[in-house]
Amino acid sequence: MRVFAGYVTVIGLMLIFFSTLFFATDEWKKVQSFQHELEHAVSTDTIDLNRTSLLLDQNGKIFSEVNRPYRLYVPDEQIPPFLKDILVASEDQHFYEHVGFDAGAILRAVVKNLVFTHIQQGGSTITQQLARNLYLGQEKTYNRKLTELFYAHEIEQSLSKDEILELYMNVIYFSNGVYGIETASQYYFQKSVTELNQAEMTFLASIPNNPGKYDPLDHFDQAKIRQERLLDILVSTGKLSSDDAEKWKKVPISLNVRKRTDLYPDYAFYVENELKELIARNEGFKVEMENASSQEEKNRIAEKLEERFQEVISSGVRIQTALDPILQQKSVHALNAQLQKELQGATVTIDNKTRSIVALSGGRNYKKYNFNHAFQAFRQPGSVIKPLLVYAPYIEKFKAGIYDKVNANQYCIGDYCPINYGGVQPGTVTLNQALAQSYNGSAVRLMEKVGIEGAFQSISPFSFERVISDDKTYASSIGGFTYGMSPLELTDAYTSFIDGSYQESHAIIHVKDSQGKVIYQWKKEPKKVWSSDTTSKLRKMLHEGATTGTGRAAYVSKPYVGIKTGTTNNYHDYWVIGLTDTLTTGVWVGHDIPRDMSAIERQRPSHNIWKEIME
């Protein structure tokens, strides 16, 4: 009889609402189109919750969380039955009986609200709450409550009770920016929901009813009182014995609040950018961009790529990276210790075996999403370009030996007359000495023999994004480029001196969706760049640079070490790039707006940074 009277009342109220809506609001127009819209919107195929994506280091440990709200999704089979019982008992005792709304509860709410000027009690079922969280927001008006009923009914038609409860438990708010039961479990106890005891489950279940009032951090006592009340409700509904209820009431609740994980912002920001590039290559955006006929078309493709990136990052992916936390900490410490005032810098470290980026620092006291000098700063490379653009191509073409002779005095080609550092005129030296001491005269002469086109063809396999045709001049032999290269690009290119092959280095190993399926990973496409003979000779020459040449201040005792340094015109940039038997590291030091750094040359900041990382 109660249910029948309730339905009659609800139908009557609906008629009143319809009349009001038709004459007074635009909501009626929305209601007219509900059937078509809801059939499409409310289904397991189209429901898409924003979830937190996680970045993992090489040990599988989370070091950064991407996307807000903070939500870790848990499937129905992993939600303890007791937790389902307590939330149903707390929020909607007739959940398994109604069709989306509880007529009796609505009647009681309407009667209570008649004495107030606005809605005090909503009589909302779990399904209505789900509709509100997924589609409608938290506005409290009679029009919105009516809309909520339609959504709730359609949800019940489209989803099973288990599916509704699973979604509900993953969308409800648990205070402090935390959404979903698994997220709440991890946030308040640093445990998975499957590891909670029944006292902890009930404590968490007390929060959603009023997240402000029952916030465990600000109102722990209120949450504990509600927890005990919920245990009593379970007893009254036959889901728990009185003895068990009393036992769980006495179990201490010890919060172990988890701070947001946001370590290594330099590396994390780069990973997000690399993910976008990975998506672009895998899903055709990069090819579309390259084939675009206008800047306007490129902008449209870029917008589509950004939308797709946001979609992926909001889906709760797990991004496995190659990050080495110890090397990352060393890199950041070295950079911050050596750079003072407005001086900036960047470092990149790549694992020789895997060709993965294991550490990356983007600037002094770097803050996440700030300009990252490691991959966003394009600077003149100075003499660090010589092994790649001059010496390796020369040895490759002429099969020269490292003790072959070359004139290292100043040399002019037309009006171009670069001088050696300090104005020295060393005369005839070996190729080994020429590179170790970084003489400009020998570099220009060797490029002239190789030919500009041949030299640039040798570096075409590398990922130099901003090398353009205007760079094909003899000035490039000593680092004169229009835009230059980033620290990441140059360090990446130096990995070709590991074994003569080149494979673009990446931070991301693979990306898995919320079901654990690999959805993205880089294709490994190594290219042979230098012959084994050329590689062997360049390694010996770089070793000479580390022991007796310009890199000796950065020398470290390793089974192998090879180093090349670079200083650009007017001391605007300092570079040290080199490799050991296990790692390849590049260091850049300079100012955002280039300025003369000759006053700190003898302090060797770039050398010191490289040495601290590689020791």
Image: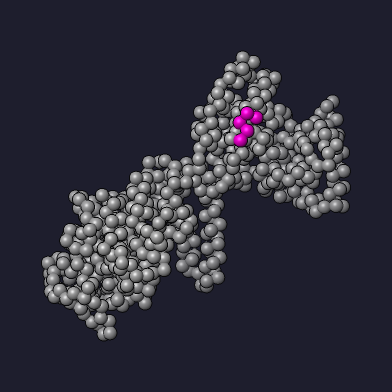
Q: Main secondary structure of the magenta part?
A: helix
Say left or right for 3 vs 224: right
Write the residue at 28% across / 56% down. Answer: 608
In terms of depth relative to the viewer, which is nearer, 365 or 340?
A: 340
Q: Vertical placement of 233 versus 498: above or below?
A: above
Question: Residue 118: horizontal and vertical position, in percent?
Answer: 81, 42
Classify residue 157 by image quadrant.
top right
Say left or right for 312 vs 549: right
Q: Name the outermost residue toward the top.
A: 243
Q: How is the image coloured?
A: one colour
Per the image, is 521 magenta?
no
Q: Vertical placement of 464 versus 150: above or below?
A: below
Question: Residue 269: horizontal and vertical position, in percent?
Answer: 45, 54
Question: Residue 13: horizontal and vertical position, in percent?
Answer: 85, 40
Can residue 157 be seen at all in this image of the molecule? Answer: no
In terms of depth relative to the viewer, which is nearer, 516 or 180?
A: 180
Bounds of the magenta segment: 218-222
Write the residue at 66% across / 44% down. Answer: 134
Write the residue at 60% across / 28% down. Answer: 203
In terms of depth relative to the viewer, which is nearer, 501 or 171?
A: 171
Can residue 90 be seen at all in this image of the molecule? Answer: yes
Say left or right for 325 vs 223: left
Per the image, is 219 magenta?
yes
Classify residue 465 by image quadrant.
bottom left
Q: Quadrant of the N terminus?
A: top right
Say left or right for 301 vs 147: left
Write the residue at 28% across / 77% down. Answer: 474
Question: Residue 503: horizontal and vertical position, in percent?
Answer: 32, 57
